[in-house]
Amino acid sequence: MTWFKRGALPLFALHLLLGWGAFAAAEETSPSGNSKTPAVSNEELLKRMDAMEAEIKDLKSQVKNYQDMTKSPIPVETPKKADESLFGLGSQSKSALKIGSYGELKFGEQQTPGGWHNGFDAARVVLLPSYQFTDNIIFNAEIEFEHGGINGGSDDKLGGGAEIEQAYVDFKFNDFINWRAPGVDVVPFGYINLFHEPSQFYSVNRPELYNGLIPSTWFEGATSLYGKIVDNLNYQFQISSGLEDTGTTGSDLPPFPGTLGGYGGGITSIGDHAGLGNAHAPIGDFNQTGSNLGFALRLSYDPPFVPGLSGSTSVYFTPNTTPRGAYGDNGVTPFALGTSSLTLFDTELRYRLPKTGFEFRGEYVQAFIGNPANLRVNNDGDPTDNVGDSMYGFSLETAYHWNLAPKIKNGWEVVPFYRYTYENLQTGGFRGNDSNAPTGAGRLQFHTLGLAFFPIPELVLKIDYQFALDDAPNSPKSDHFLGSVGWFF
Amino acid sequence: MNNSWLKIASPAVAVVSLATPLYAVQYFTVAEAQKLCFPQADRFEQAHLRFTPQEIAEIEKLSGQKVSTGGEQVWKAQLGEKLLGYFIVDYVIGKHLAIDYAVALTPEGSVKQVEIVAYRETYGGEIRGATWRQQFVGKTVQSALALNDDITNIGGATLSCRHVTQGIKRVLAVYETCLK
């Protein structure tokens, strides 16, 4: 017994202690002290570490790819088929609505019979939305706010307008034929009526031929076919609501004698927008006063054998401008007016002498009245405003493009210009119920001299002086000295 | 008036929609444009560029144009081991819509050929004419490439003429900076 107490018992206790310790070291214990998880071998640990390392590598690679993608991405073409299509570049533009703008803000002095007046005119601010439905179907519009907009309240002095000047969908088929679906469109006549942004002409106001003889901005309900005939020769054929010989809007002319003593003609020889400026057909609410269509054909060309030359020739025809219910009167009795056709012809050229700053423009326009005896102005009791069987005008312009880029950082060019315009809106051949006593106010000349400064192509600052002359005594007293800020983007 | 409109518009709609299928304003595929520019090539090797910030700065300095993408689509036109030139696809905005165009360069970096690959604007398509595009043949990064200077403008297509001219100037700067 003594040997157990002195030898075995201590040995047994020591064994118990060593065994307990080994057992404890082999276990994982939870923070609460409860130990349930089985032991993990070193091999297993190494395997797990290898797997984690591989996963980290993969994650790093993904992060790098993501970072690369969020830089400006290269549009990369991926299709491998033989008939692969261009990828990425065009599609970058086609999905978004694009909104451009052009506008003109004018200020300066204008002469009137009562003297010179200073003034300001927020002439136009125009929005140009474009949307590409598909590569072949494209929407364009022009939404215009003129002269500050429209009157919205009793304390609001605005007297301008808000109008839709273009809204159409193009179906593009090929180089030779494309269809513009019925919509609101500018009439393809001349150059400035189509391309009338302020960067397209150098004077503050649009060229004088387009202020009435060509009723710019001339837009109507219309549909077109357009395309290329051959290289450097293009066409547009349009059918539209025809011009109307009434300045009245609304589907019915005021009956005689009317609250206004009759109605004003649309084809005129004197006054604001003389010529055809008051003859637009309305585009809203089926308010056209005539039932006739207008037909326009424009050919545009830039002959390669004369580098720098561009031009166009346009013809317009409507079989009748006389509105429904039209009448003449001598202030006492009314009488019905019959039909009168209208044919317009325009040709214009623009030439930039290659490798120089010289530019020349010329234009001629003529209107042929089918039956002037049936025009309102020839039957309104006023002997001074009659129109003959034709009206015509022409202009000649010279400009010089002085490149400022070498002298002014980011500068572009200054363009001094001079334009002469002649219009005769009261040629011979008067017929109608009125007596005929023109004052000479229908024969006009304009000398316009000025500067257009383009700090960048999209922005133009203009200043000009215009001398206006006519054959009437002591008139027209409508010179001006104006400046403007214009943009187009 | 309304009857007149229907009489005019309906036949036009019917004829045009039935007889003339809509097809793309895209005139060439990349492969077709490549073959047009390098008919002798037996293969085109992709060599797309990804610009570094330094390269962007250099391209903008040489061309005077902003660089709006991170790189350029470039192919090398090869005949066996011989480099025939570079085929580059780029785009600019006309008035509001994209114009896709291709520029073929000689190995020395002068313009060999320009093709308009896709044109979407309503007006201005005259730039597709061969005479206008022919003006760019032989131009290098040292050329003025300025409208109404060494490149004739087309009235009524000014924006397209200007922007494509600027684009080609930028493409030549890309060659000078990244491919020379």
Image (tube, rainbow, N blue to C red):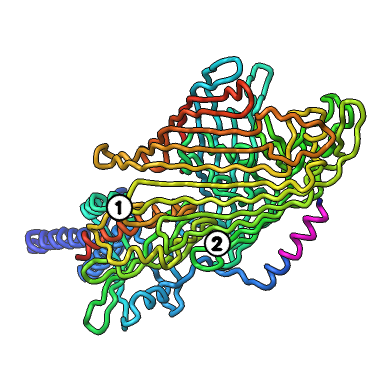
Q: Chain of mark 1?
A: A
Look at label 2 and name its amino acid: Asn
Q: Residue at x 81, y 43 (%)?
A: A322
Which of the 4 image quarters holds residue A86? bottom left
Residue A190 percent across, percent down from the top left: 58, 49
Is B92 positioned to the left or the right of A429 in the image?
A: left
Residue A463 percent across, percent down from the top left: 43, 30
Residue A473 percent across, percent down from the top left: 63, 22
User: Could you classify mark 1 by the number of other residues whose Cα lies within 10 Å: few (under 14), some (14-19), or many (20 or more)?
Assistant: few
Pick the residue in front: B143 or A31: B143
Residue B117 forms part of the magenta stretch: no
Quarter of the image for the C terminus of chain B: give it: bottom left
Q: Is residue A25 visible?
A: yes
User: Could you classify mark 2 by the number of other residues whose Cα lies within 10 Å: few (under 14), some (14-19), or many (20 or more)?
Assistant: many
Q: Residue at x 45, y 66 (%)?
A: B129
* Residue hosting label 1: A30
Q: CA distance from mark 2 to mark 1?
A: 87 Å
Pick the residue in front: A463 or A174: A463
Pick the residue in front: A91 or A309: A309
Q: Is residue A41 above or below residue A375?
A: below
Q: Helix or strand or loop: what does disc 1 sit on?
A: loop
Q: Is residue A280 above or below residue B131?
A: above
> Which of marks 1 and 2 precedes in the sequence?
1
Is A116 positioned to the left or the right of A12 in the image?
A: right
Bounds of the magenta segment: B2-12
Look at label 1 and name its amino acid: Ser
The reply to whether label 2 and label 1 mark residues of one chain is: yes
* Residue hosting label 2: A234
